[in-house]
Image: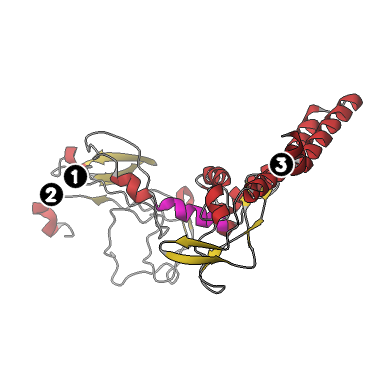
Amino acid sequence: MIIEVEERFGKVANLFSMMLNKVQCAAQRGAAVHEVEEMIWCDLIKTGRETIVAFIKEQEEELPRREVIEHEGKPLRRLPKRRVRPYMSAFGPAPFARDVYATRETQRQEVVPLDARLGMPESDTSYLLQKWSGTQFVNESYQESRTTLQSILGFAPSVNCLEDMAAQASDHAEVYFDQQGPVDPTTEAEIVVATSDCKGVPMRKVDAPRTVVAVMDGETKLRDLQELNIQRAIGILCQRAVKSSQVGRMKSSHFEQGEIRVRVSSTLYPLMETLHGESTQYGTNSGDRTATNAKMVPAEDRSGAWN
């Protein structure tokens, strides 16, 4: 058993021994602990990768290499040239060559005994690395996730690879939600909303009361229309604010456009801002001191509101 370990895992044992020697040297010179941690981590990544390579090699040697096998009632031949499979393990790239079986050279590879023995994933990325990647890209962008993994492991899957992982994981989402019980509409809970048009989530308050904004002395007040007596007139004073003059806009002095305002000009013809001396207004510093008073009146009196 010792001889087999030395033959198949000799390089792994050498790397581990070298790491221990580095630790002893660091202790003698009084190195900082964070330097030793970084050194050990890098060496463990290398040792782990070589361990995976040696493990795959051992599994390959234990498989029989038949010339012809039968699969689903038809004979398959072992192709003369071995095929290399790329594999990104949790310790880094670990590609390996293996035998494949097919009806002939140009046909699809139907049986790969070593892949089946190792339980290889459908993609070229190990399940553990997929798990780590998934915990990242559910909270960060794909590029940010790749940068995070790169800083920790020293390598990382590509952005396209991360996108493929997310797409494959989403295949199980529909099955998962089908297994969930019905939602109780009388209870409150968090929901996840995904949009694709970048317009945000439409919020519809069907049962919420409508509100009106009343500005008095610079203070904004919200009043519930359900509590508002429509028979009572409400004085709305327009808020003084910075407003630039614009071509085609009716002259309105220092009044800012609001919810309720007079739309009919009191002059014979409409006065325009840029043509009739309407400069940019600055609230209380406006040169026009006239205050327009707009009111809400009862429905039965609206026909004579402008008389």
| Quadrant in which residue 162 is drawn | bottom right
| Label 3 sits on residue | 45
Alpha-carbon span between mark 1 and mark 2: 7 Å
The crowding category of the residue bearing disc 1, from other C-alpha atoms within 10 Å (few below 14, some 14 to 19, many at least 20), is: few
Query: Badge 3, how many Cα within 10 Å: few under 14, some, many 20+?
Result: some
Residues rendered magenta in the picture: 161-171
Q: Hey, which residue is sitting farthest left in the picture? A: 300
Instruction: Give the residue displayed 54% in from the left and 56% down from the top.
Output: 123
Q: Residue at the bottom extreme?
A: 106
Question: Quick one: label 1 or label 2, which is nearer the N terminus?
Answer: 1
At horizontal 22% and vertical 38% (from top left) the residue drawn is 185
Amino acid on which the number 1 mark rests in the picture:
Ala
Residues at marks 1 and 2 touching, judged by CB atoms closer than 8 Å: yes
What secondary structure is the magenta-colored segment mainly?
Answer: helix
Residue lying farthest to the right in this orientation: 29
Write down the residue under mark 2.
298
Position of residue 285 measured from the top left corner of the image (x, y, whole percent): 49, 50
Q: Quadrant of residue 263?
A: bottom left
Q: Inspect this view and state whether residue 163 appears.
A: yes
Checking the image for residue 233, the label placed there is 1
Q: Nearer the viewer, residue 247 or 285?
A: 247
